[in-house]
Amino acid sequence: MKKLIPQFGEARLQSRADAFTTLARSIIGQQISVNSAQASWEKFATLMGGAPTKVQPSALLALPVEALRGVGLSARKVDYLKDLAQHFEDGQVHVRQWTQMDDEAIIDELVAIRGIGRWTAEMFLIFHLMRPNVLPLDDPRLLKGISENYFSGEPVSRAEAREVGDAWAPFRSVATWYIWRSLDPVPAA
């Protein structure tokens, strides 16, 4: 960290959209390239008729499946988006209480939504809720970065990564961000 922080010290994490929109964007971008994800998001946002930073769950639920499929979303992603919207509409996610909830409780709430796994929930904690102490051990880029910065490029196990990450507490999210920057100096928007 002593070497990395001065290299990228001026950049900052920023939360950009509301919780629902952030999660919808995560689902749309799953398992496709950054450019494809951006193109898919733009088509989706146009269909939704609003700003790409504010999508309403009720508006998504009101759209027929065919309309969502018409902008290039797979049947599975449409199902995931509808389930996400339903969770928000039904109050199954407790957005207003998240500031008082611990990270694991929020992760448990989010992974109950189809299409959201632990990695997506952890990214949400880091990039949307700005939680300072998340160590996403399922992230291959984190493991690669730890390998390159701490183990001379030798493969690193999750246990070894956890041990390195424990030294970063209570700012493991911040250290993770710097590790990512060491691999790709330009942060994804």
Image (tube, rainbow, N blue to C red):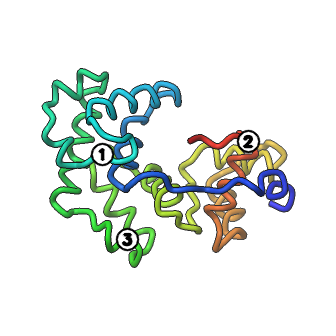
Image quadrant holding the N terminus, namely: bottom right
Report helix, strand or loop for mark 2.
Answer: loop
Name the amino acid, label 1.
Val
User: Circle 3 sits on which residue?
Assistant: 98
Residue 168 locus on image (x, y percent): 70, 68
Residue at which label 1 appears: 55
Sequence-first tag of 3 and 2: 3
Q: Residue at x 75, y 56 (%)?
A: 10
The residue that disc 2 covers is: 185
Q: Quadrant of residue 29?
A: top left
Compared to 86, does 71 lie above or below? above
**Residue in view at x 34 percent, y 44 percent:** 24
- Identify the image quadrant of the C terminus: top right
Tell me which residue sits at (66%, 48%) in the image: 143
Three-letter code, disc 3: Trp
Pointer 3 local density, CA inside 10 Å: few below 14, some 14–19, many at least 20: some
